[in-house]
Image (tube, rainbow, N blue to C red):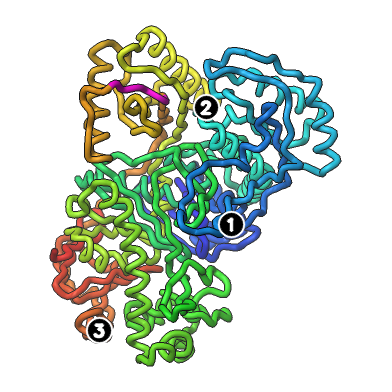
Amino acid sequence: MRVATDIGGTFTDLVAINKEGKITIAKSHTTPPNFEQGVIDVIKKSGTNAKEIETFIHGTTVIINALTERKGVKTGLITTKGFRDVLEIARGNRPDLFNVRYQKPAPFIPRYLRLEVEERLNYKGEVLTPLKTEQIAPIIEYFKKEKVEAIAVAFLHAYANPDHEKETVKVIKELWPEVAVTASHEVTKEWREYERTSTCVLNSYVKPIASSYIDRLESRLTDMGVEGHKYIMQSNGGTTTFEQAKVTPINMVESGPVAGVFGAAVLGQVIGEKNIIAFDIGGTTAKCSLIDDGEVKVTTEYHIEKTELTAGYPIKVPVVDIVEIGNGGGSIAWIDEAGSLKVGPQSAGAVPGPVAYGLGGTEPTTTDANLVAGRLSAKNFDNEVDLDNVKKSIEEKVAKHFNISVDEAALGIIRIANSNMLNALKLISVRRGYDPREFALVAFGGGGPMHATALAKELGVKKVIVPVAGPVFSAWGMLMTDLRSDSVQTYIRRCGEINFAEINQEWAKMETEATNQYHNQGVSADRVIFTRFADMRYLGQEHTVKVPVPNGEWNEEAIEEVIRRFHHLHEQNYTFKLEGAQTEIVNLHLVAYGRVQKPEMHRIESEAANIEDAVKEVRPVLFEEQGWLDTKVYAREKMVPEVLVEGPAIVEEQSASTIIYPGQSLIVDEYGNLIINTGV
């Protein structure tokens, strides 16, 4: 069996696929702070025999939680003399221009733990001042006295020549073998001093946390009898080994969410949809990402805690391009100081959870509003639902304030949540030059199918796809991923002055390093596949556009094709191109995939059946414009391919409900996916 588990803010999900392609899914509550317990719980709940697990893949929120909750370890920084305050200076960009009280984010390492050594390289990596290794020992003694648990080493221009960083790490390991150390070149070989230092620091900050968590999880899995290969999902949409994940845990910062995006791309290939907006609503957040012509977009311009008010912290590792907002099933509805209704970003989480969970929650959430509106059934909850208590909480916290009925208040909460999600969907489509009408919306997560059809109508999206295993689709996506490693090397050259022997040597070096890394993980060279990109810009520009570029040897013809692609993508992103202007390459980006065996999607038997056999009940459901309508509720597991269902209707499955509005229709495809025509 292949098994994937995904830890979310509220639930821990599992998908298991056996040799015949039969899918088993399960959910159990997330168990902070001992997250590994939730993984063990959900494996047991699914009834999976641990000894039959050949491949185990895991996605986790442990890293992002440690960063956002400031629960990493005390960390020290060793940097080039004169650059102690790079983290403090940061960037001059102020996201909130007119806020006179604006403050830069406080560095993760305070100034007294940021120390310098004499060494200096130029931008080509040539040594200007040799490293004075004798200055390292007193720094280590000081860090020991201050009870530091991890050290980051970030030197100027180490992306061009990492020798001084390697030497420093060697000395640290000799003097203090047990301390966790990260050198900046181990996590990123891109230029931009502040971003590279920030990435290195954050990796060190969470390194002991990640090692401890992975060790505990591995130990518990071994105790259960899991002897197969164990992998962890990375932010770039690929997987890596447990051992590698302990070295560069910062690559797991978006470990869970990206798997769903990748799964949506795989699903699109199977069913012939190349343009997709992946849309995932969980208990705490809503996440979306755009897949253009089958390609999942990956960026190194990622920040945590970046909002319209704060600059956040840059992490310069490859991350699938996701827009994430604090709006999920557990998002709390509240009244702000101006008397307006807001939903999120505060969440009731797994404990105490929505009022409907009966675990002591008193604040109304999106889940509670959907329950009152008839979109969710009290029968599908794990607990006995006190509907009167749910209504009372909406009445007291929302309805009374506006002097409206509980029904209107519930619909108001749903509308505000939808409005927040619509803004996120526009950010990754309309705002980036894409027309949503040319895309299909793949909706998953516990709440995705419930909100997707309303949002698709607003955006003009014609088709919504609710995949099999939708509530645990991120875990399903993990089963479809290959091993992946990204190598990004700063290599600034004007396109008209390229030395082809030199650039071909650079590509070959990157490919050899990736092949060797996979060889050490037991992946043979014939299973490694490369994809190349170049970050490019017009001469004089500051930022770049990521351009897919040809594999193999480069020559005049290849560079002309690269420039042509750059002009096209620049125009798509920024509405103009400068065909006569000089262009330059800034970074070379190599993606190396280690192909692993993946399960095939299972076609379901098409049998002549009456669609009425799938009807569970008819119940009143509250719709935005039509009010309460008697609505047929279907059991998803009893629905067969090619049968048409007209809205209004609801399709229920374990942990999710799909809403079909009046004027919309649904059909089940040969794989069991729900294909909804939105009527726009």
Nearer-N-terminus badge (3/1)? 1
Q: Position of residue 465 (x, y in %)?
A: 25, 58
Query: Is residue 404 part of the magenta span, yes or no?
Result: no
Kindly check if marks 3 and 1 are in contact, taking CB atoms under 8 A apart as contact: no
Name the residue type under label 1.
Ile
Image vertical order of residue 559 relative to residue 359, above or below: above
Q: Nearer the viewer, residue 223 or 449?
A: 449
Query: Is residue 583 part of the magenta span, yes or no?
Result: yes
| Residue in view at x 44 percent, y 15 percent | 506
Q: Nearer the viewer, residue 316 or 511?
A: 316
Image vertical order of residue 158 relative to residue 418, above or below: above
Kindly check if marks 2 and 3 are in contact, taking CB atoms under 8 A apart as contact: no
Q: Residue furthest top?
A: 501
Within the image, what quadrant is residue 453 found in? bottom left
Residue 189 — which label?
Answer: 2
Range of residues picked out in magenta: 582-587
Residue that carries the numbered disc 3 in the rendered image:
618
User: Horizontal placement of 345 versus 405: left or right?
Assistant: right
| Residue in view at x 32 percent, y 17 percent | 495
Residue that carries the numbered disc 1 in the rendered image:
40
Name the residue type under label 2.
Lys
Name the residue type under label 3.
Val
- The crowd level at tag 1 (other Cα within 10 Å; few <14, some 14-19, many 20+) is some
Q: Position of residue 440 (x, y in %)?
A: 22, 53
Q: Nearer the viewer, residue 539 or 677?
A: 539
Look at discs 2 and 1 and give the one toward the viewer.
2
Look at discs 2 and 3 and give the one toward the viewer.
2
| Residue in view at x 61 percent, y 49 percent | 221
Q: CA distance from mark 3 to mark 1?
A: 38 Å
Nearer-N-terminus badge (2/3)? 2
Within the image, what quadrant is residue 491 found in? top left
